[in-house]
Amino acid sequence: MSGCANNHVNIEGIYQFDARGVSKRFRHAAIFGAINALTPGETMRFVNDHNPLPLIEQLLVRYGDRVEVNYVNKDEGAVVIDFKITQ
């Protein structure tokens, strides 16, 4: 199999996750699965069509200080957030 997760990471350890292409029914499960796959120091760069405040609240409840949430872009239709695993 030629597909490898490392093909989608840049030199800074940032993995892209564009939620706009994931069915809303499966979106949160896919996001939690992606975050669970990260190791300390890695980041998931999340792209969505809206600001996912309920999702961020769920992430903070589940992961606490183990995840940093940093907005890269807040424009409607292309919200970009870095979720970094700290420990």
Image (cartoon, rainbow, N blue to C red):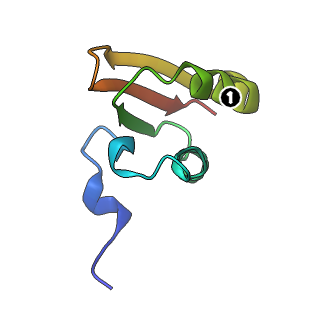
Residue at left offset 30%, top offset 74%? 3
Which residue is outermost to the bottom?
1
Q: Which residue is mark 1?
A: 58
Q: Where is residue 65, by image quadrant?
A: top right
Residue at left offset 58%, top offset 29%? 86
In the rendered image, the vertical position of residue 46 relative to residue 27, given as above or below? above
Side (left or right) of 32 relative to 4: right
Please tell me how crowded label 1 is: few (under 14), some (14-19), or many (20+) other residues with Cα within 10 Å: few
Work out whether residue 70 or residue 23 is closer to the camera in this orientation and state it.
23
Residue at left offset 70%, top offset 31%? 63
The quarter in which the C terminus is drawn is top right
Type of the residue with mark 1: Gln
Whole-percent x and y of residue 57?
65, 21
Whole-percent x and y of residue 7?
26, 61
Q: How many marks can you see?
A: 1
Residue at left offset 41%, top offset 52%? 22
Q: Secondary structure at mark 1?
A: helix
Q: Is residue 16 shown to the viewer in this render? A: no
The quarter in which the N terminus is drawn is bottom left
